[in-house]
Image (cartoon, helix red, strand yellow):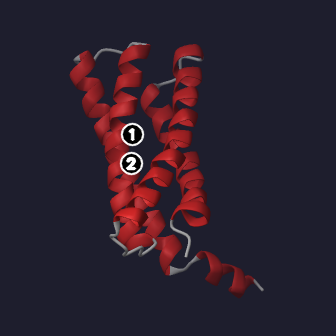
């Protein structure tokens, strides 16, 4: 029973999703920090600056994630316009939900509770990776 459970979890798809999830998280965090640095010059970000950096990093991370998930994780090889439009719209829609979570999370933890924005950004990524896998597996790249 344990062996069956492990084989369901530790397969090519979930492992590659985790690898590319980590890389997507790196894209998100690094681009967030770079945009924040460009906007603030190293000072604490205002809520507006934080949100601009967050949305900018989201756009870059979602683009990276779509390409890697489509090709390497879920092996969705169709390049027809109909399939691409369906996948991209569903992918972006799901990622907008996770962006909504991230914006609320960042504004509560940073703006209201005054936690460190970089630490809160990293913490949010763990929840987002799980959310996005579920969306991708069940709704976007389903066989």
Q: How many marks?
A: 2
- Say whether residue 33 is visible: yes
Q: Which one is in front, 136 or 90?
A: 90
**Residue visible at 53% across and 16% down in the picture:** 111
The residue indicated by pointer 2 is 62
**Residue visible at 35% across and 71% down in the picture:** 71
Q: Badge 2: few (under 14), some or many (20 or more) residues near its Cα, within 10 Å?
A: many
User: Disc 2 on helix, strand or loop?
Assistant: helix
The residue indicated by pointer 1 is 58
Q: Which one is in front, 30 or 93?
A: 93
Tell me which corner region of the image, top left, top right, bottom left or bottom right, holds residue 108: top right
Q: Is residue 108 above or below residue 122?
A: above
Tell me which corner region of the image, top left, top right, bottom left or bottom right, holds residue 80: bottom left
Left or right relative to 133: residue 79: left
**Residue visible at 58% across and 57% down in the picture:** 135
Q: Quadrant of the C terminus?
A: bottom right
Q: Which one is in front, 122 or 87?
A: 87
Q: Position of residue 126 (x, y in %)?
A: 54, 48
Real-space Cα distance between discs 2 and 1? 6 Å
**Dots 2 and 1: beta carbons under 8 Å?**
yes
User: Disc 1 on helix, strand or loop?
Assistant: helix
**Residue visible at 36% across and 43% down in the picture:** 28
Q: Position of residue 54 (x, y in %)?
A: 39, 31
- Say whether residue 26 is visible: no
Q: Position of residue 56 (x, y in %)?
A: 33, 33
Residue farthest to the right, as pictured: 1
């Amino acid at each position: 029973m344990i062996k069956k459970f492990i084989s369901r979890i530790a397969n090519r798809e979930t492992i590659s999703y985790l690898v590319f999830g980590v890389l997507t998280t790196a894209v998100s965090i690094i681009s967030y920090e770079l945009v924040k640095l460009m906007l603030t010059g190293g000072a604490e970000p205002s809520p507006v600056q934080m949100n601009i950096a967050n949305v900018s990093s989201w756009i870059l991370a979602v683009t990276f994630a779509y390409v890697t998930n489509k090709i390497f994780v879920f092996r969705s090889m169709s390049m027809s316009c109909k399939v691409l439009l369906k996948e991209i719209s569903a992918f972006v829609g799901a990622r907008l939900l996770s962006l909504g979570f991230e914006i609320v999370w960042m504004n509560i933890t940073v703006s209201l509770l005054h936690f460190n924005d970089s630490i809160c950004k990293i913490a949010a990524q763990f929840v987002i990776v799980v959310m996005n896998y579920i969306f991708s597996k069940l709704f976007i790249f389903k066989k």
